[in-house]
Image (cartoon, rainbow, N blue to C red):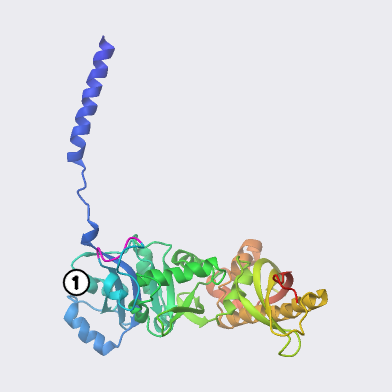
């Protein structure tokens, strides 16, 4: 009987807690989605100092009150999603065409002495609270990237709302143009930029380089970071023009589009998806091949107190087409000739990509991390810091070995 009474008392206490809990907690800090200014994309450009200071005098409540940084001012443009305008399904209206920017997002730009200052000025002009939880693309102009990303990286890394799966990219010319783009293939312009790079990864055209990976690389002692280098074309489409590579937080060079394949090959990243011409004799004896699979193994030795790297690569090819009946691809000797000729071209191409990065002191491949892992005693005694590795990298020696194999020639052999 006493046990039953205890259970009844316990049940009454639980019931009271259930009734009181909603009044104690509730959604006291809720913020409706309509009350947020959802930022989808951000672009950052250098600003004309005289015009920017005059503009800032009209919008900033801090202008002339506190000391400002010595660095030049920047112009920041944002794409803000318009509530109820972004279509949720394929059957809904509001997508495509030249006016899609005006229908789905609002592009607004401000100036500031730093990124934080610019967003503070922006918040003065937007009634809703800026929300970066859905930020997918950050576009930086080449001029800003060459000047250094220290303040930009610092701001976004400190902001807990920013996803590490967002994309940061360097734009040729003005970055703001990409915020104003209206590509017909996507109803939300920012999502077109994001999908261009995501599809590039799936097709073997570009390595995974989300903003979290970039920040991880620039934090390493034996590796530098790189970002996609893009340009907007006349039809509002975006071209990936190469890799923008860095020393620290400062951009120092850009690769050519086909040299992206060089990076992918050296790192052994799959799938492989680039096509090239192979000239066997005269210009008429030309075939086109595509790489389908890669493998790579990198070994390091210390020779004369300098790291020496041996890179062994294996690549599988398909013959995509030929331009003359002189080339009989059903002949094994011709296939071996294709393999040998492309092997020679590949060794030259990969070696050039490495030499170009050495000339700039930017080891965006991560060879330094291999030295740290495989030769820790040498690293701790001879190198120690990222700055010293940047100097040492310029003197490193490389031996590139490539083995190619033609796997398929298509359904027509002659």
The answer to which quarter of the image holds residue 349 is bottom right
Residue at the spot x=64%, y=71% of the render? 266
* Horizontal side, residue 245 vs residue 311: left or right: left
The answer to which quarter of the image holds residue 151 is bottom left
**In the foreground, 406 or 19:** 406
**In the foreground, 229 or 341:** 341
Q: Is residue 166 visible?
A: yes
Give, as a single range, the part of the protein colored magenta. 83-89
Q: Position of residue 249 (x, y in %)?
A: 45, 75
Split into 4 quadrants, where in the image is the C terminus? bottom right
* Horizontal side, residue 138 vs residue 39: left or right: right
Q: Kindly report the secondary structure that dominates the magenta region of the rendered protein.
A: loop
Q: Which residue is label 1 attached to?
A: 124
Q: Position of residue 43 (x, y in %)?
A: 35, 76
* Horizontal side, residue 254 vs residue 279: left or right: left
Seen in the picture, residue 16 relative to 310 is either above or below; the reply is above
Q: Position of residue 4 (x, y in %)?
A: 26, 13
Q: Is residue 308 visible?
A: no
**In the foreground, 101 or 156:** 101
């Amino acid at each position: 009987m006493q046990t039953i009474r205890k259970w009844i008392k316990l049940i009454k206490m639980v019931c009271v807690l259930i009734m009181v809990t909603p009044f104690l907690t509730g959604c006291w800090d809720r913020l409706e989605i309509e009350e947020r200014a959802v930022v989808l994309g951000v672009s950052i450009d250098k600003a004309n100092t005289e015009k920017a200071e005059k503009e800032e005098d009209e919008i900033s409540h801090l202008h002339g009150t506190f000391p400002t940084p010595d660095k030049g001012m920047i112009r920041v443009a944002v794409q803000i999603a318009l509530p109820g305008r972004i279509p949720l399904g394929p059957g809904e209206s509001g997508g495509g065409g030249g006016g899609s920017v005006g229908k789905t997002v609002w592009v607004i730009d401000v100036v500031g002495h730093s990124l934080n200052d610019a967003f503070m000025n922006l918040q003065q002009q937007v009634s809703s609270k800026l929300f970066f939880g859905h930020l997918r693309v950050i576009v930086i102009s080449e001029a800003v990237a060459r000047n250094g990303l220290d303040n930009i990286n610092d701001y976004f890394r400190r902001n807990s709302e920013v996803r590490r799966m967002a994309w940061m990219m360097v734009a040729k010319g003005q970055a703001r143009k990409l915020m104003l783009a209206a590509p017909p293939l996507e109803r939300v312009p920012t999502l077109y930029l994001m999908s261009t790079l995501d599809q590039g990864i799936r097709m073997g055209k570009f390595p995974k380089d989300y903003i979290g990976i970039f920040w991880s690389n620039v934090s390493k002692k034996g590796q530098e970071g790189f970002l996609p280098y893009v340009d907007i074309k006349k039809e509002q489409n975006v071209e990936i023009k190469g890799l923008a590579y860095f020393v620290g937080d400062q951009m120092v060079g850009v690769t050519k589009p086909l040299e992206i394949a060089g990076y992918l090959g050296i790192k052994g990243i799959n799938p492989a998806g680039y096509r090239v011409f192979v000239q066997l004799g005269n210009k008429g004896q030309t075939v086109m091949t595509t790489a389908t699979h890669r493998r790579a193994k990198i070994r390091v030795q210390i020779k004369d107190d300098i790291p020496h790297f041996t890179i062994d690569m294996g690549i599988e090819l398909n013959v995509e087409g030929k331009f003359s009946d002189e080339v009989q691809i059903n002949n094994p000797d011709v296939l071996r000739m294709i393999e040998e000729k492309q092997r020679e071209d590949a060794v030259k191409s990969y070696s050039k990509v490495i030499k170009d990065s050495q000339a700039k002191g930017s080891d965006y491949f991560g060879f330094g991390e291999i030295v740290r892992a495989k030769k820790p005693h040498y690293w701790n005694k001879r190198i120690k810091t990222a700055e010293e590795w940047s100097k040492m990298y310029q003197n490193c020696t490389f031996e590139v070995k490539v083995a190619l194999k033609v796997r398929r020639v298509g359904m027509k052999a002659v």
